Image (tube, grey):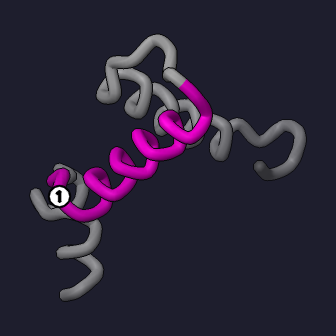
């Protein structure tokens, strides 16, 4: 987070949480370890496999490797 009146960082964090909740499509998890595992899998998928339109239809890993 940035300064008190700066909403830019908060908007980015809210966007990330929104995507995570929508794409995991889970209301509750069995346990904290299960939640950690599922969130970790989602982050790995988002960084390595999911293509992003802002990155010329590449994953972040592909984009960074160029």
Asked if residue 38 lies in the magenta stretch, the reply is yes
**Span highlighted in magenta in the image:** 31-51
The quadrant where residue 26 appears: top left
Q: Residue at x 28, y 66 (%)?
A: 60
Q: Left of 44 or right of it: where is 37? A: right
Residue at the outermost left position: 57
Q: Position of residue 25 (x, y in %)?
A: 33, 19
Q: Position of residue 51 (x, y in %)?
A: 15, 53
Q: In this view of the protein, which residue sits in the foreground, 45 or 31?
A: 31
Residue at the outermost bottom position: 66
Q: Quadrant of the C terminus?
A: bottom left
Q: Could you tell me how many numbered marks the image carries?
A: 1
Q: In this view of the protein, which residue sits in the foreground, 45 or 38?
A: 38
Q: Left of 45 or right of it: where is 30? A: right
Q: Position of residue 32 (x, y in %)?
A: 61, 34
Q: Main secondary structure of the magenta part?
A: helix
Q: Residue at x 45, y 45 (%)?
A: 37
The quadrant where residue 39 appears: top left
């Amino acid at each position: 987070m940035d300064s008190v009146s700066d909403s830019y960082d908060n908007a980015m964090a809210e966007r990330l949480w929104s995507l995570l909740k929508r794409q995991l499509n889970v209301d509750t998890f069995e346990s904290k370890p299960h939640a950690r595992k599922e969130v970790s899998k989602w982050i790995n998928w988002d960084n390595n496999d999911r293509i992003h339109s802002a990155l010329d239809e590449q994953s972040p890993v592909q984009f960074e490797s160029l």
